[in-house]
Amino acid sequence: MDNITHHQDQPAIERLNLTGQVVFITGAGAGIGRAIALAFAGAGAHIVIADREPARCEEVALQVRELGAKALPITVDVTHTDQISEAVNKAIECFQRLDILVNNAGGVSLKPFLTQSERSWRKHVDLNLISAFAATAAVVPEIIKGSRGGSIINVTSIEASRAAPNAAVYSACKAGLENFTRTMALELADHKIRVNALAPDYTVTPGVRGNIRGPVDQSQWIEPSPAREEATARRIPAARTGYDYECADAALFLASPLSSYVNGTILRVDGGTWASSGWARNKAGQWTLTPEI
Protein backbone atom coordinates (compact mmCIF):
# COMPACT_ATOMS: atom_id res chain seq x y z
CA MET A 1 0.00 0.00 0.00
CA ASP A 2 1.42 3.35 -1.03
CA ASN A 3 -0.09 5.97 1.24
CA ILE A 4 0.81 8.95 -0.97
CA THR A 5 -0.25 7.87 -4.45
CA HIS A 6 -4.00 8.43 -4.13
CA HIS A 7 -5.26 11.59 -5.77
CA GLN A 8 -7.00 14.39 -3.97
CA ASP A 9 -9.97 14.16 -6.31
CA GLN A 10 -10.44 10.41 -5.73
CA PRO A 11 -13.76 9.81 -3.95
CA ALA A 12 -13.37 9.01 -0.26
CA ILE A 13 -15.26 5.74 -0.65
CA GLU A 14 -12.60 4.54 -3.11
CA ARG A 15 -9.87 5.36 -0.61
CA LEU A 16 -11.47 2.90 1.81
CA ASN A 17 -10.78 0.09 -0.66
CA LEU A 18 -8.28 -2.46 0.68
CA THR A 19 -8.68 -4.92 -2.20
CA GLY A 20 -5.86 -7.46 -2.37
CA GLN A 21 -4.22 -6.46 0.88
CA VAL A 22 -3.61 -9.04 3.59
CA VAL A 23 -4.35 -8.28 7.23
CA PHE A 24 -3.01 -10.20 10.24
CA ILE A 25 -5.29 -9.76 13.28
CA THR A 26 -4.61 -11.16 16.74
CA GLY A 27 -7.62 -11.99 18.87
CA ALA A 28 -9.79 -11.93 15.76
CA GLY A 29 -12.22 -14.60 16.89
CA ALA A 30 -14.62 -12.34 18.77
CA GLY A 31 -15.39 -8.81 19.86
CA ILE A 32 -13.38 -5.92 18.45
CA GLY A 33 -10.99 -8.24 16.58
CA ARG A 34 -13.85 -10.03 14.84
CA ALA A 35 -15.53 -6.73 13.94
CA ILE A 36 -12.27 -5.45 12.45
CA ALA A 37 -11.84 -8.66 10.45
CA LEU A 38 -15.32 -8.32 8.93
CA ALA A 39 -14.95 -4.60 8.23
CA PHE A 40 -11.64 -5.14 6.45
CA ALA A 41 -13.02 -8.11 4.51
CA GLY A 42 -15.90 -5.92 3.40
CA ALA A 43 -13.33 -3.45 2.10
CA GLY A 44 -11.71 -6.18 0.00
CA ALA A 45 -8.84 -7.34 2.23
CA HIS A 46 -7.93 -10.96 2.93
CA ILE A 47 -7.81 -11.85 6.61
CA VAL A 48 -5.49 -13.93 8.79
CA ILE A 49 -7.56 -14.78 11.87
CA ALA A 50 -5.23 -15.51 14.79
CA ASP A 51 -7.10 -16.58 17.92
CA ARG A 52 -6.73 -19.13 20.70
CA GLU A 53 -10.27 -20.50 20.21
CA PRO A 54 -10.49 -22.84 17.17
CA ALA A 55 -14.29 -22.62 16.90
CA ARG A 56 -14.15 -18.84 16.87
CA CYS A 57 -11.43 -18.85 14.20
CA GLU A 58 -13.54 -21.02 11.93
CA GLU A 59 -16.72 -19.04 12.57
CA VAL A 60 -15.07 -15.73 11.61
CA ALA A 61 -13.35 -17.35 8.62
CA LEU A 62 -16.75 -18.45 7.30
CA GLN A 63 -18.13 -14.93 7.70
CA VAL A 64 -15.11 -13.41 5.96
CA ARG A 65 -15.54 -15.78 3.01
CA GLU A 66 -19.23 -14.92 2.79
CA LEU A 67 -18.09 -11.33 2.20
CA GLY A 68 -16.05 -12.48 -0.79
CA ALA A 69 -12.63 -12.31 0.86
CA LYS A 70 -10.12 -15.05 1.59
CA ALA A 71 -9.58 -16.17 5.17
CA LEU A 72 -6.85 -18.10 6.95
CA PRO A 73 -7.90 -19.18 10.46
CA ILE A 74 -4.98 -20.04 12.72
CA THR A 75 -5.30 -21.23 16.31
CA VAL A 76 -2.57 -19.44 18.24
CA ASP A 77 -1.86 -18.52 21.85
CA VAL A 78 -0.39 -15.04 21.51
CA THR A 79 1.38 -15.35 24.86
CA HIS A 80 3.76 -17.77 23.11
CA THR A 81 5.99 -15.82 20.74
CA ASP A 82 7.00 -18.94 18.83
CA GLN A 83 3.35 -19.58 17.96
CA ILE A 84 3.01 -16.04 16.62
CA SER A 85 6.08 -16.50 14.42
CA GLU A 86 4.71 -19.81 13.15
CA ALA A 87 1.37 -18.17 12.38
CA VAL A 88 3.08 -15.42 10.39
CA ASN A 89 4.99 -18.06 8.41
CA LYS A 90 1.70 -19.81 7.60
CA ALA A 91 0.22 -16.50 6.47
CA ILE A 92 3.12 -15.90 4.08
CA GLU A 93 2.84 -19.45 2.72
CA CYS A 94 -0.85 -18.83 2.03
CA PHE A 95 -0.86 -15.25 0.74
CA GLN A 96 2.79 -14.45 -0.11
CA ARG A 97 2.39 -11.00 1.46
CA LEU A 98 1.30 -9.05 4.52
CA ASP A 99 0.21 -5.41 4.50
CA ILE A 100 -1.59 -4.62 7.73
CA LEU A 101 -1.17 -5.78 11.33
CA VAL A 102 -3.81 -5.34 14.02
CA ASN A 103 -2.51 -6.07 17.52
CA ASN A 104 -5.88 -6.61 19.15
CA ALA A 105 -5.38 -9.52 21.57
CA GLY A 106 -5.61 -8.60 25.23
CA GLY A 107 -7.51 -9.10 28.42
CA VAL A 108 -7.76 -8.24 32.10
CA SER A 109 -8.58 -9.87 35.40
CA LEU A 110 -9.87 -7.23 37.81
CA LYS A 111 -8.36 -7.31 41.29
CA PRO A 112 -6.36 -4.99 43.59
CA PHE A 113 -2.67 -4.99 42.76
CA LEU A 114 -1.59 -6.26 46.19
CA THR A 115 -3.78 -9.33 45.80
CA GLN A 116 -2.44 -10.09 42.32
CA SER A 117 0.23 -12.79 42.09
CA GLU A 118 3.48 -12.52 40.14
CA ARG A 119 2.09 -15.19 37.80
CA SER A 120 -0.86 -12.92 37.12
CA TRP A 121 1.43 -9.91 36.46
CA ARG A 122 3.40 -11.87 33.93
CA LYS A 123 0.30 -13.30 32.26
CA HIS A 124 -1.09 -9.78 31.79
CA VAL A 125 2.20 -8.49 30.41
CA ASP A 126 2.54 -11.40 27.99
CA LEU A 127 -1.04 -11.07 26.74
CA ASN A 128 -1.32 -7.29 26.50
CA LEU A 129 2.20 -6.16 25.65
CA ILE A 130 4.64 -8.92 24.70
CA SER A 131 2.17 -10.32 22.16
CA ALA A 132 2.19 -6.98 20.33
CA PHE A 133 6.00 -6.87 20.40
CA ALA A 134 6.18 -10.40 19.00
CA ALA A 135 3.60 -9.86 16.25
CA THR A 136 5.21 -6.59 15.22
CA ALA A 137 8.66 -8.19 15.10
CA ALA A 138 7.34 -11.07 12.97
CA VAL A 139 5.02 -9.15 10.62
CA VAL A 140 6.91 -5.94 9.89
CA PRO A 141 9.82 -7.58 8.01
CA GLU A 142 7.24 -9.16 5.69
CA ILE A 143 5.55 -5.80 5.10
CA ILE A 144 8.93 -4.23 4.35
CA LYS A 145 9.72 -6.95 1.79
CA GLY A 146 6.68 -5.87 -0.21
CA SER A 147 7.99 -2.27 -0.55
CA ARG A 148 4.39 -1.06 -0.58
CA GLY A 149 4.26 0.47 2.87
CA GLY A 150 1.57 -0.58 5.29
CA SER A 151 -0.26 0.05 8.52
CA ILE A 152 -0.09 -1.20 12.09
CA ILE A 153 -3.02 -0.66 14.44
CA ASN A 154 -2.62 -1.39 18.15
CA VAL A 155 -5.75 -1.74 20.27
CA THR A 156 -5.10 -0.15 23.64
CA SER A 157 -7.67 1.22 26.10
CA ILE A 158 -8.80 4.42 27.73
CA GLU A 159 -7.22 2.89 30.85
CA ALA A 160 -3.81 3.60 29.32
CA SER A 161 -4.21 7.30 30.04
CA ARG A 162 -5.99 7.38 33.40
CA ALA A 163 -5.77 5.65 36.77
CA ALA A 164 -7.38 2.23 36.74
CA PRO A 165 -7.95 0.77 40.22
CA ASN A 166 -8.12 -3.04 40.13
CA ALA A 167 -6.48 -3.03 36.69
CA ALA A 168 -3.02 -1.66 37.51
CA VAL A 169 -0.94 -4.11 35.47
CA TYR A 170 -3.35 -4.10 32.54
CA SER A 171 -3.41 -0.30 32.36
CA ALA A 172 0.39 -0.15 32.65
CA CYS A 173 0.64 -2.57 29.71
CA LYS A 174 -1.75 -0.48 27.63
CA ALA A 175 0.20 2.69 28.47
CA GLY A 176 3.33 0.89 27.32
CA LEU A 177 1.57 -0.13 24.11
CA GLU A 178 0.68 3.49 23.41
CA ASN A 179 4.31 4.54 23.81
CA PHE A 180 5.35 1.61 21.62
CA THR A 181 2.87 2.91 19.03
CA ARG A 182 4.44 6.35 18.93
CA THR A 183 7.98 5.00 18.88
CA MET A 184 7.29 2.54 16.07
CA ALA A 185 5.65 5.35 14.09
CA LEU A 186 9.07 7.01 13.99
CA GLU A 187 11.17 3.89 13.50
CA LEU A 188 9.05 2.59 10.62
CA ALA A 189 8.25 5.87 8.89
CA ASP A 190 11.03 5.46 6.33
CA HIS A 191 9.39 2.21 5.24
CA LYS A 192 6.05 4.00 4.68
CA ILE A 193 4.51 2.00 7.52
CA ARG A 194 2.16 4.04 9.65
CA VAL A 195 1.55 3.01 13.27
CA ASN A 196 -1.50 4.18 15.20
CA ALA A 197 -3.69 2.95 18.04
CA LEU A 198 -7.33 2.71 19.02
CA ALA A 199 -8.25 3.41 22.65
CA PRO A 200 -11.77 2.16 23.36
CA ASP A 201 -13.71 2.53 26.59
CA TYR A 202 -16.52 0.20 27.61
CA THR A 203 -17.49 -1.74 24.48
CA VAL A 204 -20.01 -4.55 24.18
CA THR A 205 -18.10 -7.75 23.40
CA PRO A 206 -18.55 -11.44 24.30
CA GLY A 207 -15.83 -11.07 26.95
CA VAL A 208 -17.57 -8.33 28.92
CA ARG A 209 -20.77 -10.37 28.73
CA GLY A 210 -19.12 -13.45 30.26
CA ASN A 211 -18.65 -15.40 27.01
CA ILE A 212 -14.86 -15.62 27.36
CA ARG A 213 -14.12 -19.07 25.95
CA GLY A 214 -15.68 -21.33 23.36
CA PRO A 215 -18.03 -20.39 20.50
CA VAL A 216 -19.64 -16.96 20.56
CA ASP A 217 -23.16 -17.58 21.86
CA GLN A 218 -25.09 -14.38 22.50
CA SER A 219 -27.97 -16.31 24.05
CA GLN A 220 -25.67 -17.15 26.97
CA TRP A 221 -24.42 -13.62 27.60
CA ILE A 222 -24.77 -12.12 31.07
CA GLU A 223 -26.70 -8.90 30.53
CA PRO A 224 -26.23 -5.96 32.92
CA SER A 225 -29.15 -4.79 34.99
CA PRO A 226 -31.11 -1.73 33.84
CA ALA A 227 -29.67 0.20 36.81
CA ARG A 228 -26.13 -0.70 35.75
CA GLU A 229 -26.82 0.31 32.15
CA GLU A 230 -28.32 3.61 33.30
CA ALA A 231 -25.30 4.37 35.49
CA THR A 232 -22.93 3.53 32.65
CA ALA A 233 -24.82 5.81 30.28
CA ARG A 234 -24.60 8.70 32.74
CA ARG A 235 -20.80 8.62 32.87
CA ILE A 236 -20.33 8.46 29.08
CA PRO A 237 -21.01 11.70 27.18
CA ALA A 238 -22.51 9.69 24.30
CA ALA A 239 -24.97 8.31 26.91
CA ARG A 240 -24.51 4.67 25.88
CA THR A 241 -21.99 1.87 25.67
CA GLY A 242 -19.89 1.42 22.56
CA TYR A 243 -20.17 -1.33 19.96
CA ASP A 244 -17.39 -3.38 18.43
CA TYR A 245 -18.23 -2.25 14.89
CA GLU A 246 -17.53 1.36 15.89
CA CYS A 247 -13.96 0.38 16.74
CA ALA A 248 -13.81 -1.50 13.43
CA ASP A 249 -14.88 1.59 11.50
CA ALA A 250 -12.10 3.59 13.18
CA ALA A 251 -9.58 0.84 12.42
CA LEU A 252 -10.64 0.82 8.76
CA PHE A 253 -9.97 4.55 8.61
CA LEU A 254 -6.51 4.10 10.15
CA ALA A 255 -5.63 1.30 7.73
CA SER A 256 -6.81 3.10 4.62
CA PRO A 257 -5.37 5.92 2.50
CA LEU A 258 -7.97 8.21 4.09
CA SER A 259 -5.53 8.47 7.01
CA SER A 260 -2.37 8.68 4.90
CA TYR A 261 -1.04 11.62 6.96
CA VAL A 262 -2.05 10.15 10.34
CA ASN A 263 0.86 8.53 12.15
CA GLY A 264 1.69 7.93 15.81
CA THR A 265 -1.83 8.87 16.88
CA ILE A 266 -4.01 7.44 19.64
CA LEU A 267 -7.61 7.53 18.38
CA ARG A 268 -10.03 7.35 21.29
CA VAL A 269 -13.22 5.44 20.48
CA ASP A 270 -14.87 6.08 23.81
CA GLY A 271 -17.98 8.19 23.33
CA GLY A 272 -16.15 11.13 24.93
CA THR A 273 -15.30 9.46 28.23
CA TRP A 274 -11.65 10.49 28.27
CA ALA A 275 -12.63 14.08 27.54
CA SER A 276 -15.07 14.09 30.46
CA SER A 277 -12.18 13.52 32.93
CA GLY A 278 -14.35 12.52 35.87
CA TRP A 279 -17.46 14.49 34.97
CA ALA A 280 -20.66 12.44 34.87
CA ARG A 281 -24.37 13.11 34.69
CA ASN A 282 -26.35 12.94 37.89
CA LYS A 283 -29.79 11.34 37.94
CA ALA A 284 -31.29 14.65 36.87
CA GLY A 285 -29.11 14.62 33.77
CA GLN A 286 -26.82 17.44 34.93
CA TRP A 287 -23.03 17.23 34.62
CA THR A 288 -21.26 17.05 37.98
CA LEU A 289 -17.97 16.03 39.57
CA THR A 290 -19.76 15.00 42.75
CA PRO A 291 -20.65 11.29 42.97
CA GLU A 292 -24.28 10.40 43.48
CA ILE A 293 -25.25 9.63 47.07
Image (tube, rainbow, N blue to C red):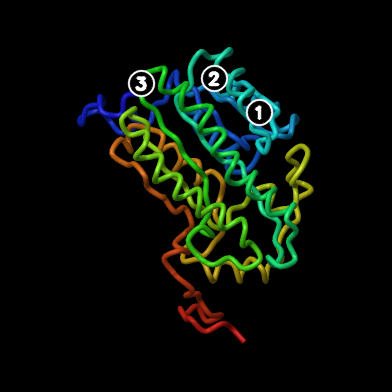
Residue 2's image quarter? top left
Q: Amino acid at mark 2?
A: Gly
Judged left or right of residue 48, residue 207 is right
Number of on-image labels: 3
Which residue corresponds to mark 3?
148
Q: Badge 3 local density, few (<14 within 10 Å), some, or many (20+)?
A: some
Look at the numbered disc 1 and give the secondary structure of its residue: helix
Q: Badge 1 local density, few (<14 within 10 Å), some, or many (20+)?
A: some
Compared to 94, does 253 lie above or below? below
Q: Quadrant of the N terminus?
A: top left
At horizontal 43% and vertical 21% (from top left) the residue drawn is 19
Q: Which mark is residue 115?
A: none
At horizontal 37% and vertical 47% (from top left) the residue drawn is 265
The image shows residue 119 at horizontal and vertical percentages of 74, 52
Nearer-N-terminus badge (3/2):
2
Nearer-N-terminus badge (1/2):
2
Q: Badge 2 local density, few (<14 within 10 Å), some, or many (20+)?
A: some
| Residue depth check, mark 1 versus mark 2: number of the one nearer the observer | 1
Which residue corresponds to mark 2?
68
At horizontal 62% and vertical 58% (from top left) the residue drawn is 169
Depth order, front residue of 4/82: 82
Look at the numbered disc 3 and give the secondary structure of its residue: loop
Depth order, front residue of 248/54: 54
At horizontal 56% and vertical 80% (from top left) the residue drawn is 283
The image shows residue 201 at horizontal and vertical percentages of 54, 57
Alpha carbons under labels 1 and 2: distance apart: 31 Å
Residue 147's image quarter? top left
Q: Quadrant of the C terminus?
A: bottom right
Q: Amino acid at mark 1?
A: Asp
Which residue corresponds to mark 1?
82
Compared to 36, does 168 lie above or below? below
